[in-house]
Amino acid sequence: MLWAGKLGALRKKVAALLACASLVCGGGLLLLAVLPGNSFYGETITSANLPQGKKLVALTFDDGPYPPYTQDLLKVLESRQVPATFFIVGNNASRYPEVVRLVGSKGHEIALHAGEHKDLLKLDRAELAGNIAFGKKVLEDLTGKPVKYMRPPHGFRDWLVMDEVSKAGLQVVNWSVIPRDWTNPGARVIAERVCKEAKPGAIVLLHDGDAPFQKASREQTVEATGIIIDELRKQGYEFVTVGELLSNQTAE
Ligand SMILES: [Zn+2]
């Protein structure tokens, strides 16, 4: 009886250990899916390796188009002759097709954020494929150009997401600088955060939209963008699209 009691206690300990291990393991896998900067589930671009002395930075804008902020931002970029990359939401693009065409006509790069702004980790394979295909088609129909890059909402991705993104012929691009502009901390604060973190090859995450509900103002981001460009130019930086940034990479 004593032996049976010991065995029972041991089994309970093993079960508890296994439960802990699976929790740690599951937590770790989830963490890798939501952290923007790792390639655990497949290649995730967050910055570029540039040749020594080349000071290029890519400004990227998520969640648009969102009038009037997207158009206001285009004016700031145009006044300074700066190209940027817009990660656009498919259903926002369907709602404001003329704004997407305007973005494209100003020489900016158009990339996909998602068909609908959802947590892609919660979708099954068919839903994922549909979401991505819808967004890609809307953008390509509007601009007449192939879309190459996708930034999943919140940067979240796992094996299934990466598989469907790559099947659609897209590459995942996250970011290396995140000033949390969506919290509207003030244009000066947003700009300071970016200028502090910027390095050659950086990809900066900003927002011209407020997906999925498009409620908050993006006035601060628009104002901050002008300050960021002026400040970083003083430090010798040039601004390029994500595609141009990656084409300047050195072979590792
Ligand atoms: Zn987003």
Image (spheres, rainbow, N blue to C red):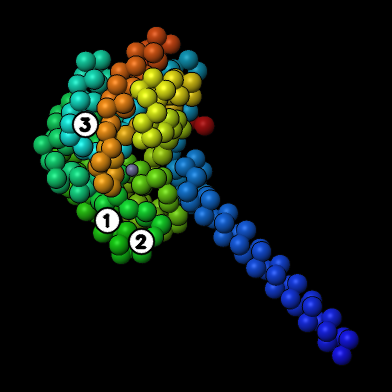
Q: Can residue 239 be seen here?
A: no
Give the class, few, some or many, for how many residues have Cα within 10 Å of label 3's Cα (few <14, many ≥20).
Answer: many
**Secondary structure state at the residue bearing disc 1:** helix
Q: Amino acid at mark 1?
A: Asn
Q: Amino acid at mark 2?
A: Leu
Taking the image as shown, residue 192 lies to the left or right of residue 21, namely left
Q: Quadrant of residue 87?
A: top left
State whether label 2 is within 8 Å of ligand 1.
Answer: no
Q: Observer-nearest residue: 27 or 211? A: 211
Q: Earlier in the sequence, mark 2 or mark 3?
A: 3
- Position of 23 relative to 77 (above/below): below
Q: CA distance from mark 2 to mark 3?
A: 29 Å
Which mark is drawn over residue 202? none
State whether label 1 is within 8 Å of ligand 1.
Answer: no
Q: Earlier in the sequence, mark 3 or mark 1?
A: 3
Q: Position of residue 80 (x, y in %)?
A: 25, 15
Which mark is drawn over residue 131? 1
- Residue lying at the far left in this picture: please name it: 98
**Given contact means CB atoms under 8 Å apart, are the residues at marks 2 and 1 in contact?**
yes
- Residue under label 3: 70
Which mark is drawn over residue 123? 2
Residue found 39% across the figure and 40% down from its top? 173
- Residue lying at the far top in this picture: please name it: 234
Q: Amino acid at mark 3?
A: Thr
